[in-house]
Image (cartoon, helix red, strand yellow):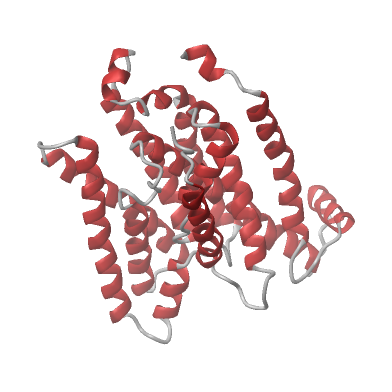
Amino acid sequence: MGERARTLTPRSGLAVALLVAALPLLALAALLIGPFPLSPMEALAVLWRGATGTLAEGDRAATVLLSIRLPRVAAALLVGAALAAAGACYQTLFRNPLVSPDILGVSAGAGLGAVLGIFLSLPVAAIQLMGFAGGLAAVALVGFVAAAVHTGDRTLVLVLAGVVVGALTGAATSLLKVLADPYDQLPAITFWLLGSLAGIKTEDVLPAAPVVLLGLVPLVLLRWRINVLSLGDEEARSLGIEAGRLRLAVICCATLVTASAVAIAGVVGWVGLVIPHVARMLVGPGFGTLLPVAALLGAAYILVVDTLARTVSGAEVPLGILTAVVGAPFFLWLLARGRRAWA
């Protein structure tokens, strides 16, 4: 299966080439479009002044481009790639196309951590840190529960433990919403849970980027081995792969990137569920190609959705609303087609 799985088909190669070419163009468009539009020449002039240290104090174009849009575009690329890659990993790992990055409770746990931070009136950095820690803690609890149960299929026990932990953290989040100040804390909690990149700053992106890369790099390096997990544990073992250890490594890495994405953007649904399906339609189920294509597609998708979120109306539209508006009908269309895109 080795060489055949590693070879890009003409269709897959074309899809990868188009995505790689389109992503910088989409990023450039996102930098220029907004309530304060910039021309390409203005953007280049700002970048030149920034590189040469000749930015004037009060330069509005420089503030918009360097302090607002550039961090936001970087965050959109990071969040989209992280959620889509995690979704592709979980779907392959559990051999189920309906699995998403929150299957083990990571999104619910991160949501609880961030909501607790807002409830305690902590600064933004502490809220993000608590969201990240909450996501990791939820998955650690799932792993502990699954390890304590010695009966039944291990994968099924893991999923059921994730459902239980997700329900408990969701209940705790609802309790905090009831107890929160309805005029100050509750709107902030609601807006964060719907997902948004509004107000993102460079200091928010810089700590998250290395963590996301720390999770994505092993997944990319192990993608050919992860492909074998879709065949089942027995088949993987017959090919010399220790399925248990590999599954644990994949869960840790996918949880790391998901928790990082949720910590800076809030709970953004449907990306990790729908984007891997689109990638699978483009390049097939081979995980070696599916993972990078899903990451590129996710980055492009969140970039486009976030650009719409800040331009479609005078008020900021939460990302979770737009991703649901696009993702739910698309998923229904996939079901209506009746074709097996998963194999």
**Can you see residue 59?**
no
| 264 and 195: which is toward the camera | 195
**Can you see residue 312?**
yes
Determine the residue positioned at 41% across, 43% down.
Answer: 97
Q: Is residue 177 left or right of residue 156?
A: right
The x and y percentages for residue 120 are 34, 72
Q: Is residue 106 left or right of residue 286?
A: left
| 125 and 240: which is toward the camera | 240
Determine the residue positioned at 33% across, 61% down.
Answer: 113
The x and y percentages for residue 165 are 23, 55
Q: Specify the quadrant that holds the C terminus.
A: top left
| 156 and 141: which is toward the camera | 156
User: In which quadrant of the rendered view does residue 57 lie?
Assistant: bottom right
The x and y percentages for residue 136 are 32, 48
Q: Is residue 106 above or below residue 248?
A: below
Determine the residue positioned at 16% across, 45% down.
Answer: 145
Number of dots carrying numbers: 0
Instruction: In the displayed orientation, state which residue is furthest to the right.
Output: 41
User: In which quadrant of the rendered view does residue 91 lie?
Assistant: top left
| 317 and 6: which is toward the camera | 6
The x and y percentages for residue 172 are 25, 68
